[in-house]
Amino acid sequence: MDISLDTKDEKNNLDPSNIKPRPRFISLRGHLLQRNITWFLMALPALLWLLVFKYLTLFGSWIAFTDYKVRRGIFGSDFVGLQNFEFLFATDTAIRATRNTVLLNLLFIFVGTVFSLFVAWLIFEVYTSRFTRYYQTLLLLPRFISWVVVSYFVFALLSADKGLINSALKSFGFDAVSWYTSPDYWPIILLLVSIWAGVGISSLIYLSGMLAIDPQLYEAAQIDGANKWQQFTRITFPMILPLVVINLLLAMAYIMNADFGLFFQVTRNQPLLYPTTDVLDTYIYRSLTVTRNVSMAAAAQFYQSIVGFALVIFFNWIVRRIEREDEPLSLF
Amino acid sequence: MMSQKQKLRELRRQDTDRLMSFIGRFSVHFALIFFSLCCLIPLIIIISASFTDEIALTREGYTLFPSMFSTRAYELIFKNPRAIIQAYAVTIFVTVVGTVIALTLMSLLAYALSRKEFVLRKPLSFFVFFTMLFNGGIVPYYILMTQYLRVQDTLFALLLPYFVVVFYVLILRTYFAALPEELFDAARVDGAGEWRIFFSIVLPLAKPALATIGLFTALNYWNDWTTSLYFIRDSDLYPLQYLLYIIQSNAQAMQIQSSVGNITVGDVPTQSARMAMAVLATGPAAVFFLFFQRYLIRGITLGSFK
């Protein structure tokens, strides 16, 4: 039976000989089981993928409790209890990586949110202008450049002898800085790069929140003589505060996970910069492929995952408590 | 959106203090132009360096505009283009095949999960979304890929990682669930099966959502270098971004060697040639982005409201 609506069909449908009484509701219910089977078959390929790549790997976390030997496999290797974790936390590196991950993420989240809100507000104020879409396009552009290419241009800016920043410093009479050997500057450099890469998307999210505010509120405020700043503090900000808080909380839930590309590529994996740039993800990468200590990597990984899980549950619980009934924003 | 725009325009017309509002708008535009330029300038620096003469680049460093124009970097690359053509072939293959498979898998799953009459909807949704909360991470994944599936140094290793991204399934499911139920009933009355409904009603109607998710997925594949970092050693299978990374880290290693006086003559491209490679690797993605950006903006807004 054809479902297209071209004229030929419609004519056929109008032909009295074609009209048969259809047991409509019975047929709809009768096929429900069959439809359920079809839906399950539709979902199956993706479910199998999730089973293998998400659930099997979940059980694979067992490595963290074994003395892993490639030849003996995950479940054939000797169980060693919490020994890997003892070794892990006996090193300063793991503590340092945790500290860097959490502190840098906090920095990125808070400064990034304030800046994104600011940019969203700027765009909102001139939303009727025809330039708006060009601003949005350009602000989104960095998100779609790979971290490898980003590291190329950061190098063009920061290279000790050829970089633009050092050329500028010298022309103003300052001393050149050897950026790639000075860890102290890197929290700020990484903050700037992460804002640069992320501001497009998060300002877009806040902008869409601002556009949902009833314009009559602004009309009333204007009649009462409120200036732009007052309109922002009294209308725009309170109205999008729930969205901001929820985005902040959900970002906090993932605070144990660092952006591997940002920390690995942009720093060019320079060991001299590790004191301020080594995060859990880069530490796990090195343990896994460079020092080849799989059990240690697995212990760090399990620690990252389990703390992350607890944080997601905790922050989601908070979000659930403060979200509005009609506008669910929590993850689950 | 249009009526919203009109209302805001109306509001602006009523603004009483015209001079202040003009100065205000001017400074807002000024700030936005500044931020937009900040997003553009890095690309300009790379393009400029790729067109700069190598000696001038070494002497004067990176500049916003070529200090001495030269196309030699591109000539060098195209004189011996095997590596980059091979990398392009790998990247294009993986991006196209990967995106088609990923979109198919994700939209089928999202459609099933969007059906209210699907008895397994609740448990399967939990099965899917639980992976967002807790996952094993890279270490078990690495063991799985290399010891059990043994896909290292194959195209499968590059294709597999992005088949299902749960967050995208979430967006698609919301979109499918918002389609009017009468449409499905009407199609069923006319005897259309679920596959038929999916392919000839749901997919055409969901084009904007599919375009957005397709774009995100394609960019994930195009910009992927971490997968190769873990699983690809065969240089014939290097995708573009990984080739760029390898060139960069080789150059870095050579610089260290030469600085300790142990100069080896390797096959390391000049600085301008490296920048030219970066331009060639980013160009298509940038054009693609500009072409589809309206879907992108719509999609992000869609995602933020679930």
Image: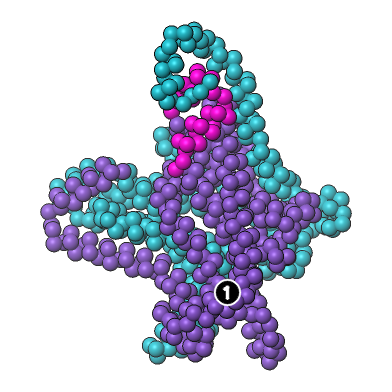
Residue appearing at x 53%, y 20% in the figure: A1
Colour style of the rendered protein structure: by chain
Magenta: main secondary structure equals helix
State the image coordinates of residue B26 (x, y, percent, origin top left).
22, 64
Q: Nearer the viewer, residue A332 or B234?
A: B234
Q: Quadrant of the N terminus of chain B?
A: top left
Chain designation of label 1: B
- Image side of residue B81 versus residue A209, left or right: right
Residue appearing at x 41%, y 68% in the figure: B40
Q: Which residue is under mark 1?
A: B78
Using the image, determine if residue A141 lies above or below residue A52: below
Q: Which residues are magenta?
A: B180-208
Q: Secondary structure at mark 1?
A: helix
State yes or no: residue A90 in magenta.
no
Q: Nearer the viewer, residue A188 or B236?
A: B236
Specify whether residue A272 is in view: no
State the image coordinates of residue A207 (x, y, percent, origin top left).
35, 51
Q: What shade has chain B been given?
A: purple
Q: What shade has chain A been given?
A: cyan
